[in-house]
Amino acid sequence: MATATEKLELRREVTVWGSYMWGYADVGADIYAALGLVMLWAKGATSLAFALAGLVYIMIGLAYTELAAAYPVAGGGQFFTLRGLGDFWGFVAGAALLLDYTIDIALFATASAGYINFFLPYLFGINIDSLAVSIGPLHHVNLVWMAEALALVFFLIALNIRGMRESSLLNEVLGAIDILTESTIIVFGFLFAWRPELLAHQWVTQFPTFKEFAYGSSLAIISFVGLESISQAAQETKRPATVVPRTSVGLIFTVFIFATAFSTMSLGVLPWQDIAKAVGDPVATLAHAIPFIGIIAGPFAALLGATILLISANSGVMSASRLTFAMSQFNFISDWFNAVHPRYRTPYRTILVFSGIGILQLVLSFLTPNAMDTLGNMYAFGATTGYILVFIALIKLRFTDPYAPRPYKVPLNIKINYRGRVVEFPILGVIGTLGISTILFEVILTHAIGRIAGPAWIILCFLYYAYYRRSKGYPIFGNIPRDWEAQQIKVLEAAEEYDLLEEYKQALAERERLEAKAHVK
């Protein structure tokens, strides 16, 4: 039992498989929500939209792999940006990613409920769209769907307060079943239902306009957002410097293969209009059209889609709470949030408050013509903004913190001389910055809600940040002095990464020896 004065910390309970499944729960499930949305806009070029977004995602994933292995603490992209670019930009990254995580809760709870509604025609002879009502000037408001999604969010809040082990176990079991099911659908789909001539026909005759493709490809990033969940859970992962690179690289290519395979198969099995029309349950609709297994695969895919999207929303609850827990520790938000439940050792205040924001976003989205599209708009804005800053931080940290051990480094590095020492400059960081900047440009150009609501969220968060920092006497645009080296030593000790700790101490000692030698001269 902790004493009254002892600072409670997050418990390290996440294993290798648990770490992988935290990422897969947030990324691997996204195709269930994104396939219909992207198909609605990218049409016959849907597979190209997923492939291009996937290439950018691979670069994002490799950057996160390096940074999360080097800095295994809660906070993810916000912490990496803080380390590399300072307090203000660390806050901006945190605000953008927090938008992503709260939307994650709302979007994937809504999508999960959408797959549950696949069974309504079979059980009750009704379609979920027929239950929509008009409320004054608002039309087609689906209160039943909204109530289902809200019930799922409340369940996840209780689960996450109960503990990381219980929350992670849910991900591990359902994630394993989902990988097997998705693989089965892909194999049977290509063997018994895929028609390359239909794919070619839709590519030639149903190719979107440039604006439609830009809109669709920017939404495709939804299928690849969430790798940060692994880095968010790094502070609760056993031996993170060893585990994170393995799980991240494995996840990157698993999800890329699934996303491109599903989109390519879809265009060779059904007209794109059929998938786009089933925006609430596109994978179930696709599976139902496969011969031999369709009568079973359709309902099973719907059931699995509901569960895997639920654990994706679960990852949103975890990531939002861990991100804000870290932000409170670094004086970006009130230290009231920096509290761990005395029994369950979970950040219960951040779970309650920021899941509550996700609930508000969910309710407001159902007051718009298309709740899924509205949430997808804002999701893409938050992700792309945060990822740009992470890429820049990756480059900057190679120069400003060359001493921290990096168990994994992104490929394509060139050695350059910088202030008397050799630095490995990450070319992939520059390419990734350009790639994700292009997607952000597409979001701003084509997403009416995203380009308004996204910046408005950042501004509101900044107003709170400025008020809080001024009330505490902290600089708004400057940095609070921090002993990053002592903090890094503490992190490596807590993670039991003793080999890396020794390597780090030796690097610091060598630096001091060289500085002393230069001073004597």
Image: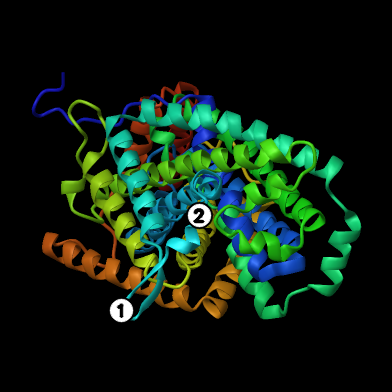
Asked if the residue under mark 2 is in contact with the one under mark 1, i.e. CB atoms within 8 Å, the reply is: no
Q: Secondary structure at mark 2?
A: loop
Q: Is residue 238 above or below residue 182?
A: above
Q: Give coordinates of residue 500: x percent, y percent.
A: 49, 28
* Quadrant of the image occupied by residue 56: bottom right
Does dot 1 land on a helix, a strand or a loop?
Answer: loop
Q: What crowding class fits label 1: few (fewer than 14 Cα within 10 Å), some (14-19), or many (20 or more)?
A: few
Query: In which quadrant of the rendered image does the N terminus lie?
Result: top left
- Height in image: 77 above or below 488? below
Look at 70% across and 66% down and name the residue there: 273
Taking 142 as reference, is 43 left or right?
right
Q: Name the side, left or right, on which 256 lies relative to 350.
A: right
For this rendering, which residue is in front, 436 or 303? Answer: 303
Residue at the spot of label 2: 126
Give coordinates of residue 271: x percent, y percent: 76, 62
Q: Residue at x 50, y 52 (%)?
A: 114
Which residue carries the number 1 mark? 136
**In the rendered picture of this protein, how many numbered marks are placed on residues?**
2
**Is residue 404 shown to the viewer in this render?**
no
Q: Amino acid at mark 2?
A: Ile
Of the two numbered discs 1 and 2 in the rendering, the one whose residue sits closer to the viewer? 2
Mark 1 residue type:
Gly
Residue closest to the eye, 223 or 231: 223
Residue 271 horizontal side relative to residue 174, left or right: right
